[in-house]
Amino acid sequence: MSPRLILRITLALLCVCPAWYGAQAQSPWPNRPVRVIVPFPPGGSTMESVVRQLTQNLPQTLGHQILVDPRPGAGTVIGVDLAAKSTDGHTFVGVANSFTVNQTLVRNLPYDGLKDLQPVVLMARTANVLAAHPSVPAADFRALIAYARKFPGKLSYASFGNGTTAHFAGEMLKVGAGIDMVHIPYKGQGPALQDLLAGNVDIMFGNLPDFMPHIRAGKLKAYATTFLTRVPQAPELPTVAELGLPGFETDSWYGLLAPANASKEAVARMNTEINRVLADPGVRTTMIERGLEPLGGTVEKFGEHLRAEIAKYARVVREAKMKID
C-alpha cells in the first residue's frame, strides 16, 4: 500500500469519526505540572509540611512535577479563592479548620465552599496544646483560669489568624471557663509562635507537632491538650476536658480540595495517590512521631466531614459571638 493511499484512508477515518480521534488524542491526567496551593505562610505551617511530605514522591507516579505554592493572607481566604477560581484542571488547595469556620465567620466570602470547591481527601489531624510563655504567673491550667478570672482582660492569646483553630479554641475557653482574654491574630502560626516565645503574648493554642520541641526545651510551658483523651506523644499532659471543661475538644485537620470544575479523573487520581502514600508504613510512622494522625479515605467521606464541620463551627461562632478582630 502506497504512502499516499495510507494518508487518504487516515484522513477519511478522521472525517468519519472525529470523536474517536479526539478521545485518542486527549492526554491522560495529568498532562502538566500539578499545583497545590497552601494558604498559610511558608516555613511555620503544619499544613505545608503535611502537603510536602505526602506529595514529595508523587512526580514519579504522576509523571509531572508537584508545585507547592504558598499563598497566605486573610485567614486563608486569598489562597482558597485563588484555587476556587482556577480553571487549569491541575490546581488543588490544602485547607484546614479555618476553611469551614470562614463559611460563617467571614462576611462577603468571595467563594462558596461547598459549590465552588470539591473535596479530594482528608489527609491528617493533630491535637492542639495550650501553652504559655514562662513569665505567665500560673503553674497549671486551674491556676491559669483563676488568674484570668481575677484579672479580666489582662491575658492575651495569640492565634494564627481569624477563624483558625487557635482562634476557635481561645473563644471556646473564654465561654467555657467564663473568662475574658484579648485575642491577638497573626498571619500564620509561625509569627504567632515567635511572639509567644518572645513573651509578647501570653498564651496560645498551637499545633502539637510544632509546639512540643519548645515545650520540652523549657521555652514554653504546657497546660493541656485538646483531644478528649490524652495524646500518645505527650501522655504526661492532661486534657482540657479532664481539667474541668467536659466535652472541650478541638483539633487541627488537613485536607485537599479541588475547584468545582476539576475533572472527576483528576480528583479520583489525587485521592488514590494520597491514600497510597498515607498507607506507607514509613510515612505513617514519621507522621505519628510528629504528633500527626494519618487519615485518608474516600472523597465522599471528606465531603461529609466538611459539611459536619461547617455546621459545628457555625453553631460555635453564634454562641461565642465570634468576630474578626
Image (cartoon, rainbow, N blue to C red):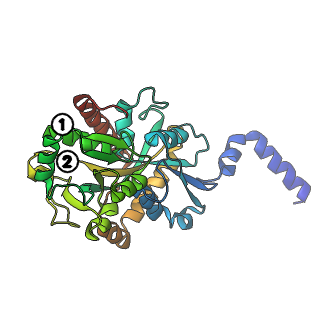
Q: CA distance from mark 2 to mark 1?
A: 13 Å
Screen quadrant of the C terminus = top left
**Could you tell which of marks 2 and 1 lies nearer the N-terminus?**
1
At x 48%, y 47%, the residue is 39
Asked if residue 26 lies left or right of residue 195, the reply is right
Q: Position of residue 208 (x, y in %)?
A: 29, 60
Q: Position of residue 234 (x, y in %)?
A: 20, 66
Camera-nearest residue between 232 and 307: 232
Indicate the quadrant where residue 238 lies.
Answer: bottom left
Query: Which amino acid, mark 2?
Result: Glu
Q: Residue at x 35, y 30 (%)?
A: 104
* 105 left or right of 245 in image: right
Mark identifier at residue 175: 1
Q: Is residue 262 above or below residue 4?
A: above
Q: Residue furthest bottom?
A: 282
SS type, badge 1: helix
**Mark 2 highlights which residue?**
249
| Residue 226 in picture, x, y percent from top left | 21, 52
* SS label for mark 2: loop
